[in-house]
Image (cartoon, helix red, strand yellow):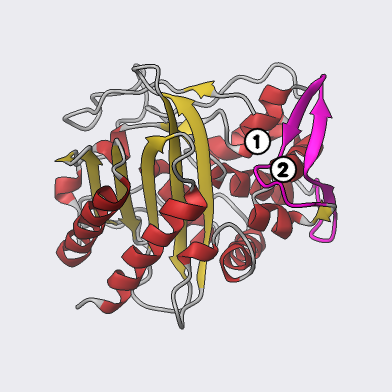
Amino acid sequence: MRTIPMRILPICLAAGACGAPGARPAAAPAATALDARIQRIAGEELDRIVAEWSPSRAVAVVLDPRTGEVLAMVGRAGRQRASALASNQAWVTGSTLKTLTVAAALEEHTITLEQRFGCGRRVISGETFHDGSEAPCDTLDAAGVLAKSSNVGTSYIFDTLGSARLTPWLVKLHVGDAPGELPTIEDDKTVRAVEFASGEVAKATPLQMAAAYAAIFNEGFYLTPSFDHRPSVGTRVLKEDTARTLVQMLEGAVSGDGTGKGARIAGARVAGKTGTADATDETGADVCYASFVGSVLDREPRFVALVGLELPQGKATGATAAAPAWGKLASRILSDR
């Protein structure tokens, strides 16, 4: 698939310093994160990730999905601390966006849970669009599309939906708010359109993606990330049944033979999604943003966490780097006291 140039946005020193005029201000820096224990764990785990993978940038965000409170938010630019990176740096999302495409299709009743979709390879307007895996593939249901992170399967789901119905759902979930970016799709029957639905075009900050997933894990209620010890007022953005169905799918993406299996924690029910996006940084270098976002369903404290790494292309993926790193972070949140 094509490499998509990624606009590297500046790291702002104060909330609201980035973004278009009139846009919602960026979130506050990580210094105001609410849980000192989780903040310490996140920082230690991010340092371990940096030592293991040597990413050019790395982030970790932890939210309470019931209140919107930011429990931890840490960033590294090389080995230097960059506390606001997760709220002020927008990356091409990668396949974490696929969950939101499926959410929109379920909300719009354009697909059913039993429906099967092609996967593997597809020709669109003379261009070949393909899945990341070379494993043989026949058809997948929506849960399988997420578990296998099928680009082609997502493209067929997008066919039922179209950009005119997908984009408003992303807006409701605040994916692409400044400093993020949603594309304008003029023709849904192009590779660019299906790349959009698969997570290869839209940009969002890690905090935005964590908050969107928090809505899924909070039975469809979106809460604006909060740094001020005052829980946000929730807004229903997804039906409860849709949110619960997505959680089941995301659990299957980890517990089964899906791309998220690296995030498993012994004795716990983990649900989440990998993301891998190829792009070009401000120097022209080919980079990859690898991420995993998810939650532990049957343990306290309740949290949604995202781990993201920017690496040279081909070095790692969301499955090989971000998911295992997420599992270590989440395990420590549950066990370290």
Q: Position of residue 70 (x, y in %)?
A: 28, 54
Asked whether the beta carbons under mark 1 and mark 2 sit within 8 Å of each other, the answer is yes
Q: Which mark is residue 215?
A: none
Q: Position of residue 183 (x, y in %)?
A: 57, 22
Is 163 on the left-hand or right-hand side of 16?
right
Q: Secondary structure at mark 1?
A: helix
Residue at the spot 48% in from the left edge and 27% down from the top edge: 279
Q: Quadrant of the C terminus?
A: bottom left
Residue labelled with disc 2: 154
Q: For this rendering, which residue is in front, 244 or 12?
A: 12
Q: For this rendering, which residue is in front, 78 or 209?
A: 78
Say what amino acid the circle numbered 2 marks: Thr
Is 179 on the left-hand or right-hand side of 15?
right
Say what amino acid the circle numbered 1 marks: Ala
Is residue 74 placed above or below 279 in the rendered structure?
below
Q: Earlier in the sequence, mark 1 or mark 2?
A: 2
- Which residue ends up furthest to the bottom in the rendered image? 267
- Mark 2 residue crowding within 10 angstroms, few (<14) / some (14–19) / many (20+): many
Q: Position of residue 221 (x, y in %)?
A: 50, 56
Per the picture, the main secondary structure of the magenta-coloured stretch is loop
Q: Give residue 244's quadrant in the image.
A: bottom right
Residue at the spot 58% in from the left edge and 37% down from the top edge: 199
Q: Secondary structure at mark 2?
A: helix
Is residue 219 placed above or below 19 in the rendered structure?
below
Residue at the spot 80% in from the left edge and 45% down from the top edge: 110
Is residue 133 inside the magenta stretch?
A: yes
Q: CA distance from mark 1 to mark 2?
A: 7 Å
Residue at the spot 78% in from the left edge and 49% down from the top edge: 109
Q: Give residue 234's quadrant in the image.
A: bottom left
Q: For this rendering, which residue is in front, 316 or 266?
A: 316
Residue labelled with disc 1: 197
Magenta stretch in the rendered image = 110-137
